[in-house]
Image: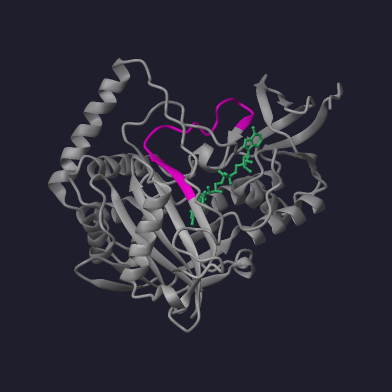
């Protein structure tokens, strides 16, 4: 379909996934109702395509949408099992379905126009932005908020991936503790280069998301994820005969110190993973997306430009680059790194640090809890690498590969036709 008259709007949201959904909800919440808004995405997001786990203070907007939340979490290594009380924070699980539903409701209330087609070229002349849409239409917008996935501007000094597979397991008797989530369980076999951990997010005593995650440069095979998850299930002492596999969740998230420009041109703002909301050292993204959605909505409600603060302070991005380097070059072991952080700091401080919310004094305490020599070596290596990068032309960043998706549920290796694990 083509339409010669451009669609004139105040705001065009390119991409309607996590970041855009949180933004639509925030615009509605802050009563930003007078604006003309377009949402451009070839896919209308619905249902459970991902599960967000994140921490934060209890929140009246998010809490009604949560599937579960926990005041206590476990961090386990081969040497010990630590139970952390997160007060005043809580760890929370939010499935995508309620977020997309909330966004759809906001979209209706905001009277937004939905274009179910890809956004192609974006041309910013400094006063308005023209967006060519795949169906032939053109959108002319005062501001563009762009969360379409894209690789970083150039290759990073360290390029890892957080890649994972999760099984939603239903047990035929109580086997999970719904009062407590497992945040990171490093007892999984560690990969030769990288870090692995399992985790458990129970929504009841017989229903939980059990996940195997690797932070490393390369993906596993389909069979590799299944074998790792089966191994973790056995480590938890869960009897496969008493479990049914209800859903499978796969994902890949970039973990890199490569730059994700948040403001590529005067009237284009990038949000979500494309705008640098993914924390390089952990892959956690949700809290920054939520924070930035709120900042954009508040700015618009006050008649200001929709520009959020940087997802993380610059010094945090530098610390992440050093930590990633130390982990990648083998100077620091992943389980040991996280174990020391939680051993020598209140859990609440570590979690605030991972969200970019600590003060410089708290960050000194955090850095002092890591092993000093490998960190000094990584800092020196990072500095030398930055200098080398300045002297040579930038290398293009590799694209984030798609997740390895296994067979359909029911014929998943290790499950019989009823989804019962074998
Ligand atoms: C399975 C999974 C689980 C995750 N779990 C967590 C978690 O527990 N905690 C956490 O903090 N983070 C998590 N993340 C990371 C991050 O929070 C999510 O990836 C989040 O959805 C990122 O939001 P986004 O808007 O940047 O990207 P997306 O949600 O991927 O949205 C991008 C949108 O852009 C659209 N698009 C693509 N091309 C075009 C185009 N040309 N034009 C217009 N639109 C386009 C896509 O259709 C999509 O809807 C997870 C990621 C995955 C994949």
Whether the magenta-drawn stretch holds residue 255 is answered as: yes
- Horizontal and vertical percent position of residue 49: 59, 54
**Is 140 on the left or on the right of 274, as rendered?**
right
Please name the predominant secondary structure of the magenta segment in the image: loop
**Is 416 on the left or on the right of 323, as rendered?**
right
- Horizontal and vertical percent position of residue 95: 58, 61
Q: Is residue 233 visible?
A: yes
* 319 up-or-down from 213: above or below: above
- Horizontal and vertical percent position of residue 13: 69, 38
Whether the magenta-drawn stretch holds residue 416 is answered as: no
Instruction: Identify the residue at image location x=24%, y=62%.
Output: 339
Instruction: Identify the residue at image location x=73%, y=30%.
Output: 142
The N terminus, quarter of image: top right
* 234 up-or-down from 134: above or below: below
What color scheme is it?
one colour
Q: Nearer the viewer, residue 283 or 112?
A: 283
Q: Is residue 358 visible?
A: no
- Horizontal and vertical percent position of residue 311: 48, 44
Report the residue that reaches farthest toward the bottom.
173
Q: What is the count of numbered marks?
A: 0
Q: Nearer the viewer, residue 69 or 133?
A: 133
Q: Which span of residues is magenta-colored? A: 251-268
Instruction: Identify the residue at image location x=43%, y=32%.
Output: 259
């Amino acid at each position: 379909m083509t339409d010669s008259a451009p669609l004139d709007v105040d705001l065009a949201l390119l991409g309607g996934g996590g970041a855009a959904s949180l933004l639509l909800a925030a615009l509605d919440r802050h009563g930003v109702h007078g604006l003309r808004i377009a949402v451009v995405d070839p896919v209308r997001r619905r249902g459970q395509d991902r599960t967000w786990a994140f921490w934060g203070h209890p929140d009246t907007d998010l809490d009604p949408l949560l599937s579960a939340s926990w005041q206590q979490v476990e961090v386990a290594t081969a040497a010990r099992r630590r139970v952390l009380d997160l007060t005043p924070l809580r760890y929370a699980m939010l499935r995508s379905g309620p977020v997309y539903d909330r966004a759809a409701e906001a979209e209706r209330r905001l009277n937004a126009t939905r274009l179910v087609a890809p956004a192609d070229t974006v041309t910013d002349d400094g006063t308005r932005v023209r967006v060519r849409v795949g169906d032939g239409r053109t959108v002319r917008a005062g501001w563009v908020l762009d969360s379409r996935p894209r690789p970083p501007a150039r290759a990073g000094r360290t390029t890892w991936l957080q890649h994972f597979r999760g099984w939603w397991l239903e047990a035929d008797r109580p086997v999970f503790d719904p009062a407590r989530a497992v945040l990171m369980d490093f007892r999984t076999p560690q990969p030769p280069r990288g870090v692995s951990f399992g985790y458990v997010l129970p929504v009841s005593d017989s229903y939980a998301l059990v996940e195997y995650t690797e932070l490393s440069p390369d993906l596993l095979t389909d069979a590799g994820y299944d074998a790792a998850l089966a191994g973790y299930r056995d480590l938890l002492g869960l009897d496969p005969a008493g479990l049914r596999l209800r859903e499978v969740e796969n994902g890949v998230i970039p973990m890199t110190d490569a730059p994700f420009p948040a403001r590529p041109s005067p009237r284009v703002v990038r949000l979500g993973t494309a705008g640098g909301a993914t924390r390089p050292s952990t892959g956690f993204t949700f809290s920054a997306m939520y924070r930035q959605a709120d900042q954009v909505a508040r700015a618009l409600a006050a008649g200001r430009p929709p520009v959020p603060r940087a997802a993380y302070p610059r010094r945090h991005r530098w610390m992440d680059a050093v930590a990633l380097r130390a982990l990648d070059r083998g100077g620091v072991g992943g389980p040991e790194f996280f174990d020391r952080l939680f051993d020598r700091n209140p859990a609440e401080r570590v979690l605030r640090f991972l969200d970019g919310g600590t003060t410089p004094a708290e960050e000194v305490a955090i850095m002092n809890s890591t092993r000093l020599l490998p960190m000094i070596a990584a800092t020196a290596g990072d500095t030398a690498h930055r200098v080398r990068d300045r002297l040579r032309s930038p290398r293009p960043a590799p694209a984030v590969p798609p997740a390895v998706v296994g067979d359909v549920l029911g014929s998943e290796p290790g499950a019989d036709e009823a989804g019962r694990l074998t």
